[in-house]
Image (cartoon, rainbow, N blue to C red):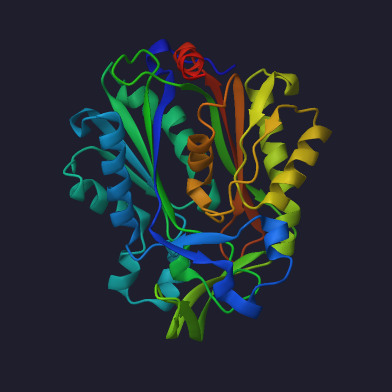
Amino acid sequence: MDIQEDTNRLGISAVSVHRPSWILNNAWFGETMPRKFSRHTGIEARAISLEDEVTMGVRVVRKLQAETGCNLADCRGILFASPSFLPPSIADRFLGKSQARHERPQHAARQLTKRLNVPQIRTLGINWFCCGYSRSLSLIQKRWASRLNLQNNDFILVVAASRISRITDYSCSQTAGLFGDMASATLIAPLTSRRHPAHFELLHADARREQIEHSAFNFEQRANVPIPLPNGGVAHADKRIVYTLDGMAIADTAPRQMSAAVASALEASSLSGDDVDYVVPHQAGTGIVRFTGMKLEEYGIGGQLINGLTERAGNVSACSVPFALRETWDQLSGIIACPTAAVGSPGKPEVLRGCVLLKSTPYHELRRTQAA
């Protein structure tokens, strides 16, 4: 197990989720959507946000405050992860200098802390696509924890805001229905905290780049792109920057990457596959999660596999794991593995993978018993 000083041992105390009110059902897509889409992904609908990523982040933090009573005066840092900002190489190619600046995650993170009235705290913005959550927790555990030296009432926030709807080509049969918009906020506190008692100890977090044979991800600027309207109609954008995806390649590699990430995390933590009680993978789609379970079995990794959370949400990218934790909160117990997989840099033959290992705390087990 990773050796940490007691003062640096951290845990997840709470997770809040903001879901936009506009829900786009599969029926809107008509013949654009493949007949077997729902069977392969489990997706029947997804939320679309009319607000930008920063506003979504503000909303979910305010919701977290309402649900937990946390005081932002005790917040020592905010790590903001968003997969829907254009990577710098793409923004610089297609946008002017001023517009490109607004696609920088660090710029958005500063805007978030400013709107939350905590502009002086440690702030970082990242875009690690669907691995944003595992990357965020890795940075907190390996870099921030020792530097911040959190005291009893202190905490860190991991805020994720995914608005991939704004970079989606709704005429593309491969990608149009995959993603849903969502924001999440995770409160990370010392295990010793009495004000924010941890439910899940953070044992291990990691995220890294892995090489693959061919690039499976890029961006294009396309003309006359259809865009859904809240009234059920459709508009058309004269020009829109959209992502492109080799769906078959991702569906093949993602389960392999996630299962390998769990195996690597267990080895680094001196744990075995039999120690795992639950696996809460990135909810990329029911088919990908099922395949991940099969690959985990090949590594000798057990545990109950959490699947089927995409039905009304879609793939919510960096919000996927916190959303899944929130949805299964009272069910989870023991050692929990949360693997993620994502596209890499656009145009490069790479993918991202990560894994977070959690362990339920005595406080969580007590609350589960009381709730039963």
Give residue 190's quadrant in the image: top left
User: Which sits in the foreground, 45 or 211?
Assistant: 45
Left or right placement of residue 113 versus residue 353 in this view:
left
Tell me which residue sits at (75%, 59%) in the image: 213
- Residue 78 appearing in the image: yes
Tell me which residue sits at (68%, 42%) in the image: 258
Vertical relation: 58 (above or below) 190: below
Left or right placement of residue 196 versus residue 357 in this view:
left
Tell me which residue sits at (69%, 24%) in the image: 267
Left or right placement of residue 193 versus residue 341 in this view:
left
Tell me which residue sits at (24%, 29%) in the image: 69
Task: Return the x and y of residue 222 as percentages of the image width and height.
Answer: 52, 83
Task: Return the x and y of residue 36 as percentages of the image width and height.
Answer: 74, 66
- The mark total stands at 0
Give residue 230's quadrant in the image: bottom left
Task: Return the x and y of residue 292 as percentages of the image width and height.
Answer: 73, 43
Task: Return the x and y of residue 270 as percentages of the image width and height.
Answer: 66, 17
Vertical relation: 76 (above or below) 110: above
Q: Residue furthest front?
A: 372
Left or right placement of residue 324 versus residue 166 in this view:
right
User: Which sits in the foreground, 120 or 176?
Assistant: 176
Q: Residue furthest right?
A: 298
Q: Quadrant of the N terminus?
A: top right
- Residue 214 appearing in the image: no
